[in-house]
Amino acid sequence: MSVSIGGINIPESLIMCEWRLGVVERLLEQVMPFLPPGTVTQAKIDQIRSDVFNELQKKYPDAGLTLNSGPK
């Protein structure tokens, strides 16, 4: 039996998130050395985070998601 909150299957979502994040991290480690300096700025990272969060809010409208400053 899986736990679901706000329409989100928690165990499945956590595993998928860890897997996808691991793939993205490794891809970035391979690509970053080839990017020109200044390609990835803090402003661009902040915009991406905001865009992704807005997509998550739309995907999970019943989850009551709020944006904070990120991991501490």
Image: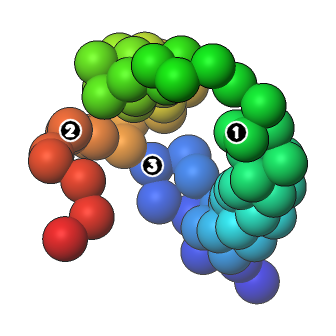
Which of these two is toward me, 40 or 18?
Answer: 40
Left or right: residue 71 versus residue 37 is left
Residue 16 appearing in the image: no
What residue appears at the point 70 percent right and 67 percent down from the top-left corner? 18
Name the residue tied to disc 1: 32
Q: Amino acid at mark 3?
A: Gly
Quarter-wise, where is residue 4 in the image? bottom right
Name the residue tied to disc 3: 6
What residue appears at the point 78 percent right and 31 percent down from the top-left corner? 34
Could you say where residue 63 lies in the image, as x and y percent from the top left? 36, 43
Could you say where residue 26 lies in the image, as x and y percent from the top left? 81, 57
Left or right: residue 46 versus residue 31 is left
Q: CA distance from mark 3 to mark 1?
A: 36 Å
Q: CA distance from mark 2 to mark 3?
A: 17 Å
Is 47 rendered above or below residue 56?
above
Its colouring scheme is: rainbow
Q: Secondary structure at mark 2?
A: loop
